[in-house]
Amino acid sequence: MSSLLLPPLKGFAEFSVFKAQNSDKNRVVALIESCYQEHGDQVILNGDDSDLLNLEDNYRGRDGEFIIVEDQQQTIIGCHAVIPLDQQSQACTFRRLYLRKSMRGIGLGQALMQWALEWARSQGFQRVEFWSDTRFERAHKFFLKSGFLTENVTRKMDDGIQPYSEFFFWIDL
């Protein structure tokens, strides 16, 4: 269990929120792997998922944040992360918004998104930009409902077990 406890997400006092630590890596990877498997994919730690090998350096070490949400059994049921795009811009990117399948549709994803937007604003960011796997159709509807914009611009990726594409999303804060 993590020791960096944060305030609960709005409307979800029954869950604990923590700053992810490297000791949480295996549990975070297991959550993300379960989400990937829904689409016939898997985590590739020597590819695009290599950020998961060192959560502290790859997020807080880059002036970002990575949080996990645990249920009462200390199982990670959700996560989300924010990092600056670069030192010159006033933009950040969202990464790693994942929820256990049984936790979707209850508002927890919206609470995680609100946390990330508030965190980005509190750090002075003016814009959020991110890419999302085109297979995550439910997530895309969620992003649009949350106020994000897209022009359905895609990029091709080949860092997984199979090639895939991603859509670009953004929101001005």
Image (cartoon, rainbow, N blue to C red):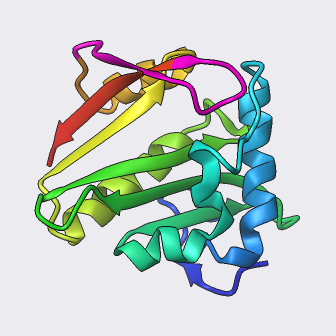
Tell me, yes or no, whether the highlighted magenta stretch contains residue 154.
yes
How many marks overall? Answer: 0
**Percent x, y of residue 148:** 26, 30
Q: Which residues are magenta?
A: 151-164
Residue furthest toward the right?
73
Horizontal side of 104 relative to 108 (left or right) equals right
Quadrant of residue 32 within the rendered picture = top right
Residue at the image position 27 percent from the left and 61 percent from the top: 120
Whether residue 37 can be seen here:
yes
Dominant secondary structure (helix, strand or loop) of the stretch shown in magenta: loop
Tell me, yes or no, whether the highlighted magenta stretch contains residue 87.
no
Horizontal side of 41 relative to 169 (left or right) equals right
Whether residue 15 can be seen here:
no
Quadrant of residue 142 within the rendered picture = top left
**Percent x, y of residue 25:** 74, 65
Indicate whether 64 appears above or below 129: below
Of 124 and 111, which appears nearest the observer?
124
Residue at the image position 30 percent from the left and 54 percent from the top: 117
